[in-house]
Image (cartoon, grey):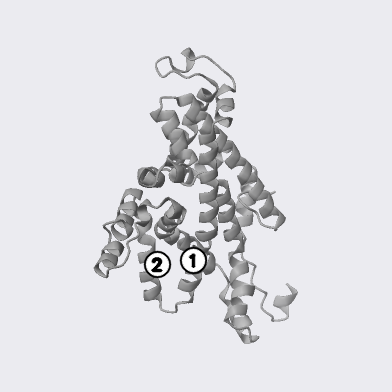
Amino acid sequence: MAAIDDGVAAPPALPSQPSAKAARGSKGMNWWGRLKRDRTLVIMTLPAVILLAVFSYGPMFGLFTAFQAYDIYNGFTGSPFIGLDQFQRLFGDPLFWHSMENTLVLSAVQLVLYFPIPILLALLLNSIMSTKIRSFVQAIVYLPHFFGWVLVVTIFQEMLGGAGMLNTFLRQHDMATWDIMTNPDTFKYLVTAQAVWKEAGWGIVIFLAALAAIDTSLYEAAAADGANRWRRLWHITLPGMRSVIILLLVLRLGNALSIGFEQFILQRQAVGRDAAEVLDTFSYYYGVVGNNFSYGTAAGLFKGIISVVLLIAANKVAHMFGEDGFYRR
């Protein structure tokens, strides 16, 4: 009132804070009220929950067959329980350990050669000033993600196979041919190249989204202070992408033993079992094809347990570097 009497306009009232009000209001709301409030999100999430329940969590009941001498005609209830006998047989099988060795070697090669490529391509694309050129290159690189492995292997066969473009060119110029598609020694690099060609575009999208979240004023301030391109990359861009890089690296390590099935089963006959046998193909051939479901299930269960241990260990390392990983402490 004193301000009005002095002829000075009163200051405008501060705007209300709806988020704080909503937070206070939600504390007294029961679960039915919250369900009604968030019904749109619930409906959008429901198909994904049903998909996971039917195709991911439902089949997990079949893991019980790893502890049985499972007979497909007698079912779960009619098959005898044999405890850990399948695992004892598995750990004494040299073919299983050979498939484990192949899986670890291929996973290590893909981690070293494949994982950094989407980061480098995203940085190169982000440095292109023209939006049209950047969008065109991104679309071209992203397109193979939608191809199936049959088409990917066929394209590589047409390019690098015995009758492919490379060997045809070598024959026309009287040079020795090199059938890369059937060479067991270079198979790990071949499947890595196929994975890079197919999935690098998908990784670029994720890292470009991380780059877009970096505040551009940081670059302007660094440029005003005299920082060149490399210093801006080292002190602004890479720290801005750090959380995404570590999260994807943790997920990659968690899936280190799941390097693929279709890609290897399509090329297993061409390069031989010694080079192309991984844990997934081992479970298929010695479990499903060999009509020994308990043995294949034991191999798959062992792979799942090791994958969970790797995932938790990688997440612990992420916490040591101050990042959240896939869950917070």
User: Is 74 or 182 nearer to us in this picture?
Assistant: 182
Image position of 301 with respect to 113: above or below: above
Say whether marks 2 and 1 touch (CB < 8 Å).
yes
Q: Is residue 30 visible?
A: no
Q: Which mark is residue 33?
A: none
Q: Residue at x 42, y 43 (%)?
A: 261
> In the rendered image, which quarter is residue 231 located in?
bottom right
Image position of 186 with respect to 31: above or below: below
Query: Earlier along the polypeptide chain: callout 2 or callout 1?
Result: 2
Q: State the SS at label 1.
A: helix
Residue denoted by label 2: 138
Give coordinates of residue 284: x percent, y percent.
42, 34
Tell me: 235 left or right of 137: right
Identity of the amino acid at label 2?
Gln
Residue denoted by label 1: 208
Give coordinates of residue 50: x percent, y percent.
44, 36
Give coordinates of residue 63: x percent, y percent.
52, 27
Q: State the SS at label 2.
A: helix
Image position of 250 with respect to 290: above or below: below
Residue sitting farthest toward the left:
172
Q: Residue at x 64, y 45 (%)?
A: 312
